[in-house]
Amino acid sequence: MSPQPVRASVLAIALITVLVGCAPPRSEPTPEPTQAPTTPEPTATPIVEQLRKPTLPPPPPADSTSLSAALMPSVADVAEAVTPWVVSITVEALTEGVFLNFSSDGAGSGFIVRPDGYVVTNAHLIEGATDIKVHLDNGETYEAAVVGQDALSDLAILKIDANELPSAVFASSDHLRVGDWVLSVGNALALKGGPTVTLGIVSGLGRTIRTQSGSYYDLIQTDAAINQGNSGGPLVDMDGHVVGINQAVLRDATGVGFALGASTAARHIESLIESGRVVRPLIGLTGQDITIAIANQLDLPVTEGVIVTTMSRNGPAYEQGIRVGDIITSIGGVPTKDMADFLLQLWSHDVGDQVEVEYIHEDLKHVAVVELAERER
């Protein structure tokens, strides 16, 4: 036998002996000292886990046919509740031609505001009409008479010979928020088969738009589809209450429609029913918005407000010392950042009210107490 294999065996046995000899002796575990329990440090949920575990709504009811029905609330109940008091309106107008006169037809929407037959719609729909018909949801048709109309708000009140009608309930548009769900209901495109219902959200509040007919204030902007024929129909919330009256749509835009806020419209409707016109207070001046550019150009001390451009010398404001070039900064303690704020605050008062008007004259602040007169038609 050669000596090399013997040396390898000896070395292997020696290595095993060394390893076994190095192992620590077995002993009983030493008990850990008793310590008071400690509160574990808070740990943040990993982002990946957040993505894997989204917050889901409760599971759909047993009779639901799809998850989408549970995620998106149905508006069918709201539509059924409001449809009975939404009406369609058809008009016939006589237009004078060069050689002869001819008649033209139009269609729009409205809704019943009192059970005794008062209907609200847009003023531009009935302008120049010689014949107006109101068509109810139950299929009945009535001849309508014009009670009153107002060009500044584009509202009109019609009266039909009917009683005990279903009527709308108004909600304050002051509590609306951008993003709230709303329904637009009306006689879109004069299609047969009942009113058209479209769903959208409130896209903006307190809008002002300028049209060929004039400027409109305190408008709700919505992406609920408003088409030709929707004019005068209601914009309702998810409780079926009127929050606006459909008024205008921008033809060169997508998903941009406007409705007059119910808080403003309700006052005008009452005035139209009672007196045939909207009674508004008069302060006796007109003005222009102050912008940063105008403020820099004229070296004005403020960048917001209304600069007086024209005045009536026998008007209430002139009598109390306000002059052309002065800057009105508030009415009744409410800031007037622009003409829209100025007019809405002015129109919130009644004829005969005495209101404090803060203004700047020659870089000095002044306060005038102005008694509001009555604006003529």
Image: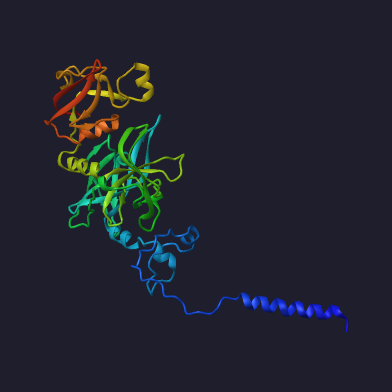
Label total for image: 0
* Model colouring: rainbow
Quarter of the image with the N terminus in it: bottom right
* Closest to the observer, 274 or 23: 23
Quadrant location of residue 4? bottom right
Image vertical order of residue 187 relative to residue 327, above or below: below
Task: State the image quarter where residue 305 is shown.
Answer: top left
Residue at the extreme bottom of the image, as rendered:
1
Q: Residue furthest right?
A: 2
Q: In this view of the protein, can residue 127 be seen by the observer?
A: no
Left or right placement of residue 326 versus residue 275 in this view: right
Figure check: 159 above or below 240 = above
Q: Position of residue 105 (x, y in %)?
A: 37, 44
The image shows residue 80 at horizontal and vertical percentages of: 31, 61
| Residue 234 % position (x, y) | 30, 50
Q: Is residue 240 left or right of residue 28?
A: left
Image coordinates of residue 147 in percent, x first then y, are 20, 42
Q: Is residue 30 left or right of residue 136?
A: right
Q: Quadrant of the C terminus?
A: top left
Front-most of residues 9 and 265: 9
Residue 365 visible to the viewer: yes
In this rendering, the answer to whether 309 lies above or below 261 is above
> Which residue does the image show at 41% across and 64% down from the upper left?
56
Q: Residue at x 36, y 71 (%)?
A: 34
Instruction: Give the quarter of the image for residue 300.
Output: top left
Q: Is residue 192 above or below residue 22?
A: above
